[in-house]
Amino acid sequence: MDAEHVDEEEISTTAALLAEHEGADVSAMVQTHLSLLMAMPRRSRAKRVARRRRYCGSSVGRRAHKRRDFATGLQAIMQDYFGVGGAPPVYDERDFETRFPVPRAFFRRVYLAVKDEPFSKQRIIATGKLQAHPLKKVVAAFRVIAYGEVADRADEYVRLSRTVIAMSTRLLMAFIVERWGPTNLRQPNQEELDAIMDRNKERGMPGCIGSLGCCHWEWHQCPTGMAGAYQTRKDKRGIVIEAVCDEDLWIWHLFVGAPGSTSDINVIHQSSLYLDATGGRWPPRNRSYTINGRTRTLPYYLFDGIYPRFAFLISRTPSRPPRSRQRPTAFKRRSGSTWRACLASS
């Protein structure tokens, strides 16, 4: 009882003291505490800045600036792929599509759209010299995207540093996704869907809206901590890409990022295509068709036979007929009679 009485007295005394000093003293303490909390990040930031190596310009021991001839790189690109002074280019259209896995017209379209962007526009530096031409940045970015090579490998050809090539590649990919993603990487509208189904109907596949397929893409720079989850069946690191396209190679569905340890059978359960189909959101069922004597309203995708059996997936090859039991039975009968004849003769 005494201990409980003492505790109650201490609590009441503390409450009374707090009640007496709720004014300026408490406010000053809170303000001081907040100021200290706000000053701690500033102090730590100042220490990091102080430890950072300051720019010292040209000095002994620093790597010298590479005198890249920007005009030489631009002249080589023009002569090789576009022609100079009315002369035809060294490499024709077929070679261009081999080096850059896109037609020349598509490359020109991307270049004309990106050349006036801030990151690719040609500027004048403080010394009065022109920086790299936009064509060189686009060529370097396409080579990195096409071959998956490191950024500084194209330095000898396009005369650009590793930093500029890496930044150009990253910004070009972001620009392409932002510019043409809403136009191309989208679900077809009703008019486009009807046109796709009409063309497939003429080819003997009524109700088909595209082909579904998966491929494994090797991931060279996979982090070590994620190597187990992204290990493919070939003991390499990779991701699974699921895509849907029509006969015009319009890829309007792309699901990228599934771990390489997953197969085509179970990767579809992670795809938005499966979730939309099972949720009734896509594809629309406002058009009926007849296939194998049965009338359906749910369009389907063609696949190669390895996917699970769903109503919106139809294999392009018919299922194998069941094996006949006559041949194994006849074979066993003949084998048995031969075996008995051998025993009788022995």
Image (cartoon, rainbow, N blue to C red):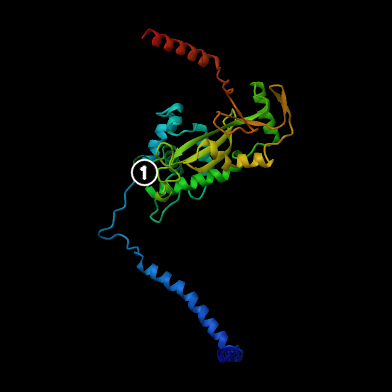
Q: Nearer the viewer, residue 27 or 15?
A: 15
Residue 178 horizontal side relative to residue 71, left or right: right
Q: Residue at x 40, y 43 (%)?
A: 220
Report which quarter residue 83 is drawn in. top left
Q: Is residue 179 left or right of residue 72?
A: right
The N terminus lies in which quarter of the figure?
bottom right
The residue sitting at 38% across, 48% down in the picture is 162
Write down the quadrant of residue 181 in the picture: top right
Query: Is 202 placed left or right of 241 in the picture?
Result: right
Residue 234 picture location, percent across and down: 41, 36
Residue 116 at least partly seen = no
Looking at this view, name the residue that lies furthest to the top: 345
Residue at 61% x, 39% y: name it: 274
Q: Give the total number of marks visible in the rendering.
A: 1
Q: Is residue 303 visible?
A: yes
Find numbered disc 1 in the image and state the secondary structure of the residue it sits on.
loop
- The picture places residue 310, in percent across and down from the top left corner, at 63, 33
The residue labelled by disc 1 is 159
| Position of 10 relative to 78 (above/below) | below
The percent position of residue 305, horizontal first and vertical second, equals: 56, 28
Residue 248 at x, y percent in the picture: 58, 29
**Residue 122, above or below 98:** below
Q: Closest to the observer: 94 or 262? A: 262
Where the C terminus falls, by quadrant?
Answer: top left
- Label 1 Cα crowd, 10 Å radius (few <14 / some 14-19 / many 20+): many
Up-down: is 99 above or below 121?
A: above
Q: Amino acid at mark 1?
A: Arg
